[in-house]
Amino acid sequence: MSAPKQHKIVLDESEMPTQWYNIVPDLPAPPPPPLHPGTHEPVGPADLAPLFPMDLILQEVSSERYIDIPDEVQDIYRLWRPSPLFRAHRLEKALGTPARIYYKYEGVSPAGSHKPNTAVPQAYYNAKAGVTKITTETGAGQWGTALALACSMFGIECEVWQVGASYDQKPYRRMMIETFGATVHRSPSELTQAGRAYLAADPNHTGSLGIAISEAVEVAASEPETRYALGSVLNHVLMHQTIIGEEALLQFAKIGETPDFIVGCTGGGSNFAGLSFPFLREKLAGTMNPHLRAVEPASCPSLTHGTYAYDFGDAAGMTPLMKMHTLGHDFVPDPIHAGGLRYHGMAPLISHVYELGLMDAVAIGQSECFAAGVQFARTEGIVPAPEPTHALAETVREALRCKESGEEKVILTALCGHGHFDMAAYDAYLGGRMTDEPMSEERFTAALATVPVLSPQAQSGVMFS
């Protein structure tokens, strides 16, 4: 009698990592620093203090390789962590591939996604600093849900600006945010100067993450006891998510496997970084050699179609300038169903890793992504959120390439959340109403024209080396 297939690789609570990993000290070159929008000089802790508590600021600029996870955060993590690693046997069979496909599933969290991995520590450090209210933005709603949950656990008021397109498409996500105790506004809103300006130009504006960030930052900067929290892009956010990859390394060690190909969806970049950065550490150390690939939506392709330059993280130009792959802070993506990927820029750290040639990227249209999502649901039994269907689409492509070549490659992907609140999107796909919006060069060119013009020394980072 043959041994049963191993579908799920689990860790005990006692095996959960107790440190986050900071990739910065292991990179062959340091990433360019954020710049003050007025002086174009590197920002210091004092520049960030109106928005973030000092503990998070110190993590943002840290050169320490590992940061201890506070006991209070670990206690909450254990509500769902360690998360499972699955072998996708049925998907492999359906594709007829010799590849072995694994997925790290973050939909087991109370919010249904990977976002609580950073929401909980951000709420903890704010509570520790005496902050009474946090503002934020959210696209599809996963981040808003996670922060609302975390704030409720630490007794902090939470106010969320949700991108208009997702606010309209996903009412149950808004309801979940409100159930956890937060207040939600459709962005752009009449509540801020930034929001009113966009509504004056277009009363039916579908919004963008950049606009929602502007609104949340504006309110946080105007209220002394209020701080702002970001769900992706920043160094400390990516670092908090590395618990995903650290767990995955331990799980692969248990079964004696090593991934050859690691793929994840990218909007701001935290999910991809969280899975891949611990494996990249091992690659840089020479202990393994996985190929890393980011997948972004064809309608918002910052890595594959953007420019690498200093740009604002928000639409109104209120944040520090960050060197990243950007489509221009004025770029408003089409209202695709993967609302969490509709961001004009990519995390500076991921952009830097990309520029160093340590990873690559592809952009895929949403119809192909939903086809992969449906196939995954019908074989593996989990309905994925629209965002990770992008990674699944590239996983399917790679598995089929292995079928053609006969290569027995080990593929690891990040299933960063479930799609239980996204059934209207699946209904559109199954009903034949989903379209892939054509993107013209003129549209990209117009948005990139808004990227700030800095001196060559500032753009290159030479003046700070």
Image (tube, rainbow, N blue to C red):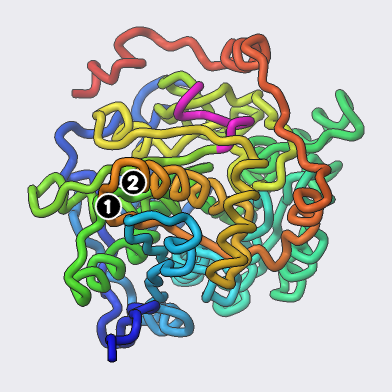
Residue 393 vs residue 85: left or right?
Answer: right
Residue 308 vs residue 32: left or right?
Answer: right
**Image marks 1 and 2: residues in contact by CB distance under 8 Å:** yes
Q: Residues within 10 Å of mark 1 (few under 14, many from 20)?
A: many
Asked which quadrant contains residue 240, the reply is bottom left
Asked which secondary structure carries label 1, the reply is loop
Q: Residues within 10 Å of mark 2 (few under 14, many from 20)?
A: some
Front-lying residue, 204 or 272: 272
Front-lying residue, 86 or 98: 98
Q: Which region of the structure is painted magenta?
A: 297-305
Residue 67's disc is none
Which residue shows up at 48% across the image and 52% down it?
52
At label 1, the amino acid type is Lys
Residue 402's disc is 2
Residue 409's disc is 1
Vertical order, 344 against 101 (above or below): above
